[in-house]
Amino acid sequence: MKLYPIETGNLKLDGGAMFGVVPKVLWQKVYPCDENNLCNWAMRCLLVVDGDRKILIDNGIGNKQDEKWLSHYYLNGDATLEDSLEKLGYKPEDITDMVITHMHFDHCGGSVKWNSHRTGFELAFPNATYWTSRQQYEWATEPNRREEASYLKENILPIQESGKLRLIDEEGEFIPNIVFKLYNGHTEGQLIPHINYHGRTVVFTADLMPSAAHIPMPWIMAYDTRPLETLKDKERFYKEALENNYLLFLEHDLYNEVCELQDTPKGVRVSKSGKLEAFIV
């Protein structure tokens, strides 16, 4: 098995929204912002190559939306999903499994692309099975008012219409060496892949822990629909992570790809962080 970070570009989001009730005087010490209070965030995906299977976890924001819509997020950086795959010698057609942790636009926008005539949409990964949780899919297709702006029909409905969508109802190992676990709070049924990498568990934390700065227990995004549920699920996750020495793969942290955890008198904190290649063989 091989693991490859896949950079798809960055976006800027308000620091207050990303850190919720945590005051700026605290969060700006660990995650910088610009003069408009905007922090720069990665949209980092993970490619798992395991034998004949090429499994991509999340796929960034895509490029289907118009310039006005995209301008709200100040996209930056030179990386694209296609270029990052190509540098490793892969094409979108090579992906066998497309795992979507949840269907917010910055996690699944690359699932679908314009067709060649720009008259409709088609799957960006035509040979892949698309995976997400049934709970999340139902939440995304009948969204609440708080989240509806994050769910774009053009990112979601073409997958279902293709017949390639596989919905899971419970936790389990649906792909060899990858266990899907479900967490609530940020959104319902967020699917968090736990990857068995040569005997060690690497967890793609998505928006359960978007960055190393979000590790302290109350550092929760204002975007979360049920922050008290997030707290409960973070506590459940930390217990497992500490007991089993999980390596956390961070989707949105511009400065760290992964981190490890430690228990301290002040609660769970980061023990080490950095590039994935420094932590795995």
Image: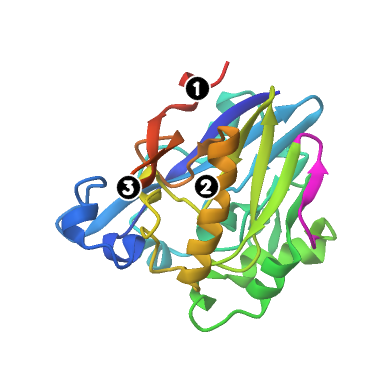
Three-letter code for the amino acid on which mark 1 is drawn: Phe
- Where's the C terminus, which quadrant? top right
* Residue 51 rendering spot, x and y as whole percentages: 80, 24
Residue drawn 69% across the image and 52% down it: 181
Three-letter code for the amino acid on which mark 3 is drawn: Lys
Report which residue position mark 3 lands on: 266
Q: How is the image coloured?
A: rainbow
Report which residue position mark 2 lands on: 238
Location of residue 259 by image quarter: top left
Three-letter code for the amino acid on which mark 2 is drawn: Tyr
Magenta part of the chain? 168-177
**Camera-side residue of 60 and 100:** 100
Residue drawn 56% across the image and 35% down it: 246
Front position among marks 2 and 3: 3
Can you name the residue that lies furthest to the right here?
163
Mark number for residue 279? 1
Label 2: how many residues lie within 10 Å, few (<14), some (14-19) or many (20+)? some
